Image: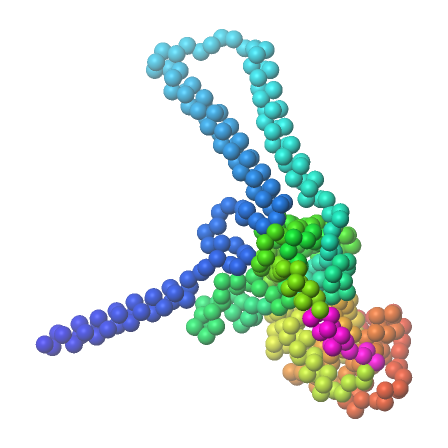
Amino acid sequence: MNFAKPLLRAATKASAGLLCAATAASAWAVNDSIGGPKVNQLNLPYGVTEISKAIYDLHIWVMIVCVVIFVVVFGVMFYSVFAHRKSKGAIPATWHESVKVEIAWTIVPFIIVIGLALPATKTVVAMKDTTNSDLTIKATGYQWRWGYDYLKGEGEGISFISSLATDRNIVGNPVEHIAAKPAGDNYLMEVDHPVVVPVNKKVRIITTADDVIHAWAIPQFGVKQDAIPGFVRDTWFKAEKIGVYRGQCQELCGKEHAFMPIVVDVRSAEDYSKWVDEQQKLAAAQKEDPNKTWVLSDLVARGEKVYSTNCVACHQANGKGIPGAIPALDGSKTATGPIAGHLLTVLNGRTGTAMASWKQLSDTEIAAVVTYERNSWGNKVGDMLQPHQVTEARSGKMPDGGTTAAAPAADAPAVKTSQADATRRANKAI
């Protein structure tokens, strides 16, 4: 009976281990991403657009041709080696030239190339035909998110930034957070603001970039178009099925390249119209007066939200940055020096570094995030930037200094200087 207890304890531990393994396995169970890649997917997706289906059919046709060529060429080669080997007494042929052979190996490859080129050319031409679109959307690549502007068609005037929605606490380290908050089937393929379009409507996507080369791609649409700074490119799609479809930037654009997904929500015409109405009402409700004078506490609170959405990935929540890669904001000369230099860095970025321009943010958002960075962590500068000063800075009238914590009267003029002077002071401070 004495040996029974150790065996019972061992059995209990083994059962607990199996239970934990089963739990971990269920937690690690991965399903197909909704509108994204499938588990163990090896082939191209058939897709939900005419172009994606044409690409898939072309891919299959080329594979068939390649397999046939492989079988014929290697079949003849292996047959020749086997049937005419020396051990069977085969005698090499003595001829050198053959007009028939020359004609055959010229005409046959030509026919193969034409058989591949005709459907490929037809598909490529169709991919580039962006005329007669029902909706035009500009997609601007930023490090590392996408900006969307609805330029033409229903929804004209809608504009938003689309950023990674996956919890930053589990990015790059999902194992430790599985129990508390599973990564989910759409890990790193989900955004806070998806692009919404109507089904069965031709959507033209105009691509460009603010900093480096990005690429706007949705495999289910058969779409991949580079977004190049200073250039405007375009592509199109016409989704034939309602649903959510996912893609990613497909140009190596920096350290957060893997964290700028693309999500398109295809809706019925009625649901799309409802979304447009909601977005327009929301934009009207959130429209802020750039001439409003804020108090320090409100600007810091607003700036914290802007920072959490746009800056935390690089500079970290504690403002310490990434040693050796991203400089800290806590105690930095930029965040504690002249406010004009700080504002210039946020507006224009910094050449030769990962710091990108953030001029796509609103004047209020820029004023708020600058104020937050100057009054958080160990930075207790005590000044702040008003939105109207950002408006003036965009036209070259840089502020000489931020307002104090005790905000001045709304009509108090700000001291201004030239942008060149502000730049010199900023560089000196840095």
- Residue 142 visible at all: no
Residue 74 location (% of width, % of height): 46, 26
Q: Residue at x 49, y 66 (%)?
A: 184
- Residue 390 visible at all: yes
Question: Which residue is nearer to you in this view: 167 or 96?
Answer: 167
For the C terminus, give its image quadrant. Answer: bottom right
Residue 10 location (% of width, % of height): 22, 72
Quarter assignment of residue 306: bottom right
Residue 195 location (% of width, % of height): 66, 61
Main SS of residues in magenta: helix
Q: Is residue 5 covered in magenta?
A: no
- Decide: is 347 above or below 407: above
Report whether 255 appears left or right of 388: left
Tell me where the magenta segment starts and ends, as one range. Answer: 278-291
Quarter assignment of residue 267: bottom right
Q: Residue at x 59, y 57 (%)?
A: 242
* Residue situated furthest bottom in the rendering: 406
Q: Residue at x 64, y 75 (%)?
A: 308
Residue 6 location (% of width, % of height): 18, 74
Q: Residue at x 59, y 11 (%)?
A: 99
For the N terminus, give its image quadrant. Answer: bottom left
